[in-house]
Image (spheres, rainbow, N blue to C red):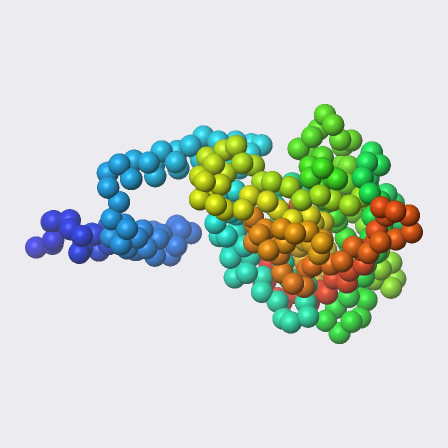
Amino acid sequence: MAELSFSESNSVQRVVERVDRHAESPLHDFMLPIIEHVHKLIRETRPTHADWRKTVEFLTEVGHASDGRRQEWVLLSDLLGVTALIEEINTSRPKGATPNTVRGPFYRADAPRLPLDANISLDGIGAPLWVTGKVCDLDGQPIAGATIETWQANSQGFYENQQPDQQPEFNLRGVFTADAAGSFRYRTVRPAGYTVPSDGPVGLLLGDLGFSLRRPAHLHFLIKADGFETISTHIYDSSDPELGRDALFGVKQELVATLKPRGKADECSLDFTFVMVRAKKGRRAP
Ligand SMILES: [Fe+2]
């Protein structure tokens, strides 16, 4: 006769035996270890009824704080390093190739295509920054025609889609095409670091626990070329004192660059080479 009782020692087995092993759900293989790990966690941490009630209340608040414009669940995943870990597992690259990092919530897929040398600062507010760069393969061969998509915060640390009433649409965004030498160049302003949303349940809880909610100053890039793995990454300003405490765990040594003084007092320049890896068959772009 099958076991009827549910106990601490057989809890995983009692739940897992309910899963239809022939069910054709994409979650099938993922759910079994989740059940096992959650039960193990509960056995080890031994929460009281009140502890568990508070946990459920927190998760409920996270759900209520999420809507079409705000994704508190993604923020929770980001701040706990889960998003960065998933990025590591899925997009590790050979030495010398530009690594991927989390894309973040401020990307827009409809940014305008611009000619080389264009200025993406549509309001001209901030210290001028001249960006030059090159896209090449692991052998150093230029990739002509690569697409370079960039987006960044302004000099106050805000993206244009956070301030639709204060910044021109598509401010500090643009899509460029590398020339025959794989080079690109454009003008912008120096971005400031910023704080991730701190007024929701995730920011409040993790802020109380001492988590950093700051992101050091950076530029976002999405680099695409036929036959190569898409690169979605950041370039970080080496002078930012919060480089070691990025809330999203996106900083890697290879992605830190120095913004060099250029000409007039507050002008600076940045030069960076993106190194792409040939796409493997069957491997999807992130
Ligand atoms: Fe960002």
Q: Taking 255 as reference, is 193 above or below it? A: above
Query: Residue 246: in sight, yes or no?
Result: yes
Question: Ligand 1 shows up in which quadrant of the image?
Answer: top right
Q: Which of 140 and 30 is in front in this view?
A: 140
x and y percentages locating residue 117 in the rendered image: 89, 49
Asked if residue 23 lies left or right of residue 84, the reply is left
Q: What is the residue that sits farthest to the left in this orientation?
A: 1
Q: How many numbered marks are there? A: 0
Q: Position of residue 182 (x, y in %)?
A: 83, 62
In the image, what residue occupies the spot 66% across and 33% down? Answer: 162
Q: Position of residue 100 (x, y in %)?
A: 63, 58
Horizontal side of 57 relative to 214 (left or right) equals left
The residue shown at (52%, 61%) is: 89
* Image quarter (top left, top right, bottom left or bottom right) of the C terminus: bottom right
Decide: is 173 above or below 228. Answer: above
Residue at the spot x=68%, y=34% of the render? Answer: 161
Residue 112 can be seen, yes or no: no
**Residue 41 shown left or right of residue 10 in the figure:** right
The image quadrant that residue 251 belongs to is: bottom right
Describe residue 250's horizontal placement relative to residue 278 as left or right.
left
Residue 172 at x, y = what percent?
77, 41
Q: Which image quarter holds the N terminus?
A: bottom left
Farthest residue to the right: give it.
263
Q: Which residue is drawn at 88% across and 62% down?
A: 180
Residue closest to the eye, 257 or 114? 257
